[in-house]
Image: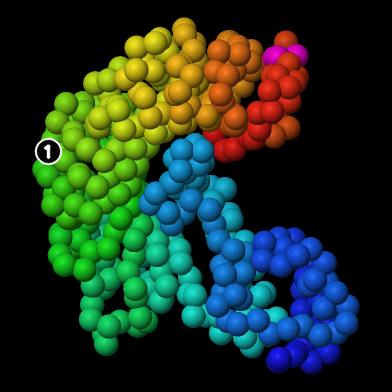
Amino acid sequence: MSRHTRSESSTIKNRLSDGVSGQLQRAYHKLWPSGQVSRLLESGIVVVYPPEIWTKILHYVTNIPYMYEDLCEPQEFFQFAINHRATSAQVDQLRAVLHQRWYLKRVCKGWKEILEKMGRPWIRTRVRNHLPVIPAGTRRLDICGVGKDPKQKNWISRLLSSLFLPQSRRSASLDGVTTLAVEGTVLTTEDIHVQDVILDAFDREGNQVRSLIYEENSAFIGDLFLAGLESSFSQLTSLTIRAYWVKGELTLQHVESVVLHVDVLDLTGWTFPSLKHYCLGSAQSDESNPLQAFDISLLPGPSLNLRSLLLYPQYELDTSMLFWQMFPALEFLGVAQINVDSSPPDNHPLRHLGSSSRPGRRQRDVYEQLAIALERLPHVVTLITPYIGNESLPEGMEVSRIRLSQTCEIRGVTWTMGNA
C-alpha cells in the first residue's frame, strides 16, 4: 500500500482545512464512512487511492452544475433552465473554480496531473484579435460580445473551424465541444451574418454539439436560420433560444429539453417529437405586459410525453381536469401564478412544484397561492421558489411565507430556493 510522507500529509491536511475543505470533505464522505479520512490525516498517513477515484473526487469539487449537461430530470429542470444559460452567478462560479483548480494543483503532483488531464471543461471567450486556445477536455464553448464589426465574422469562422481540425494540427487534443453558447448584441446585420457562420461551421461530419444556446434579445429568427439549424444541429438534445421574434418551420427529432424566451412567437411549424422538458418566457421580462394564457398551441411537442413545464410570469395557467388529462406524464410544474381548479387523479405523477415569480414583483401573494395549491396537490413532495436573499417582503407576505413553511413541514414537502 503506497503512502504519502508526513510532510505531504501535512500539506494535504492544511488544504483540507481551508476554503476548499468543505467541498473536498463532502466528496470524501460520498465514498467513505465519516471520520475515516480525518483519522488517516491525524495519523500522518494517507492512502494513495487509484487515480480513477481521485478523478471522481476532483471532478465533483470543480464541477459547475447544469453547465455541461444536455439532459436533466424533472426535479432539476427549474435550475437547469435558468443556469444552463450561464447567468452572472455561474460566471462568477467559473472564476472561483479556476482559482480553486490552480490551488488544488499545488497540493501534490498526482492531483496536478489529474487536473491537467481533466482540462478546462468550460471556455468562455469574447470576440478579440487572437483566437483562444481550446484545451483538451473542453465540453462547453461560450462566444460572447458579438457586435456590429464585420471583422468578427472572420474571427468566429476561424474559431469554429478550428474545432474540426485534424488532431495533429490542433494545439491540444479535443474530444469534442458538446455545448455551444452564442451571446451577442447584434448577430445579424447587412455586413455580418454570424448566424450563417455558425451554421456553416457545424454543418459537417464530426459535429458533437448536443446543446445549443443562442441569445440575442433583439434578434429576428426566421425560416432561413431555422432551416440551417435543422441541418447543422440535427443531433441536438437541448435547445435554448432568447430572441425578440421567432417564426418558421423547425423539426428536431432528438430534442428533449427546450427553453424559449421570445417576445413574438409562432410555433405553428415546430415539431419536437421527443420533447420532455419545456420552458417558456419573454426575452424582455417586462411584467407590465398583459398576461397570456398558456395553451397547447404554444407547445412544440406532444403533451402526452411532457415531464416538465416551466412558465414565466408572462403566462398564466389554469389547471382543470382537462389539463391533467392532456399532460398525464407531467412530474414538474413551475408557474408564476397558479390556480388549481381541480386536483389531479390519484395516479398522476406530478411530484414537484415551482414558482417562477419572485415575491413582491406582483400584487398577488405568491406564498399564499402556493399554500393553497399544495392543499390541492396532495402528492407533491418538493417545492422550489426563487431565492430572495436579504430582500424585505411586501407587507403581509411574510405571514404567508411562514404559513407556507409550516404547511411544507406538516406535509413533509422539501422547500428549496434557487436562482430566478
Q: Which residue is mark 1?
A: 223
Q: Is residue 399 magenta?
A: yes
Report if residue 3 is visible in the image. Answer: yes
- The C terminus lies in quadrant: top right
Residue occupying the point 23% across, 81% down: 166
Task: Specify whether 312 is left or right of 278.
Answer: right
Residue occupying the point 45% across, 16% down: 345
Q: Is residue 168 above or below residue 129?
A: below
Colouring: rainbow
Q: Is residue 197 magenta?
A: no
Task: Examine the image and state in which quarter residue 297 appears.
Answer: top left
Q: Is residue 250 above or below residue 35?
A: above
Task: Specify whether 414 is left or right of 213.
Answer: right
Dominant secondary structure of the residues highlighted in magenta in the image: helix
Q: For the magenta stretch, what is the residue range? A: 397-401
Q: Give the percent coordinates (x, y) of residue 321.
A: 39, 10
- Please count the marks in the image: 1
Q: Residues within 10 Å of mark 1 (few under 14, many from 20)?
A: few
